[in-house]
Image (tube, rainbow, N blue to C red):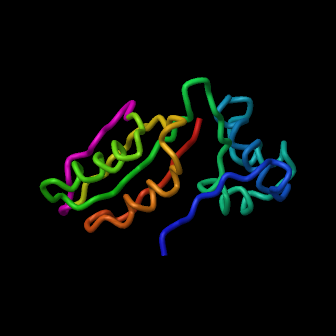
Amino acid sequence: MADKYFVVKQKALPEVLLKVVEAKRLLEAEKVMTVQEATDAVNISRSSFYKYKDDIFPFHENVKGKTITLIIQIEDEPGLLSNVLGLIAEYHANILTIHQTIPINGIASITMSVEILPVSGDSSEMIEKMEAQMGVHYVKILSGE
């Protein structure tokens, strides 16, 4: 079953998840140098940090819209990337950056930043449709700004 994405208000999140976000912020801002220092600063275990670090991130909206960075792993088949890009266009989202690796063993990794505009609609639905494409191994949200 594909991952589902939810936007949840901060007050509804368990405290441990908020602390994981704070620990990640401390690391990114280089206010601490190690995961141990970050987890000590926010008073959570390293195991809690590692358990949730890839699954939670702050979601920021800016004036134009929201930007999400995705990593997509697809089979190296003619037209497959075009189909994925077509889905993004179908949702009226805007591709800001895109980088594809050279396929290894028939699999290519693509990192892209996509601006979700007010007219784009449900971005989680767009991601689900991407994941449902034949030849798409997974779509993962790396970050949201």
- Foreground pick, 77 / 105: 77
* Quadrant location of the C terminus in the rendered image: top right
Determine the image quadrant of residue 41: top right
1 in relation to 4, above or below: below
Determine the image quadrant of residue 46: bottom right
Tell me where residue 82 appears, x and y as whole percent.
22, 48
Instruction: Give the number of marks.
Output: 0
Q: Is residue 36 left or right of residue 105?
A: right
5 in relation to 33, above or below: below
Q: What residue is at 67 percent from the left and 52 percent from the top?
A: 7
- Which stretch is magenta? 95-106
2 in relation to 62, above or below: below
- Foreground pick, 44 / 11: 11
Tell me where residue 21 appears, x and y as whole percent.
72, 45
Q: Residue furthest left?
A: 78
Q: What residue is at 80 percent from the left and 56 percent from the top?
A: 13
Tell me where residue 51 appears, x and y as whole percent.
67, 63
Q: Residue furthest bottom?
A: 1
- Based on the picture, tell me whether residue 25 belongs to the magenta stretch: no
Q: Is residue 145 left or right of residue 29?
A: left
Tell me where residue 73 appears, x and y as whole percent.
33, 57
- Foreground pick, 82 / 49: 82
Q: Is residue 42 left or right of residue 122?
A: right
Q: What residue is at 23 percent from the left and 61 percent from the top?
A: 75
Q: Which residue lies furthest to the top in this view?
A: 63
- Foreground pick, 43 / 127: 127
92 in relation to 86, above or below: above
Determine the image quadrant of residue 88: top left
Q: What residue is at 30 percent from the left and 52 percent from the top?
A: 84
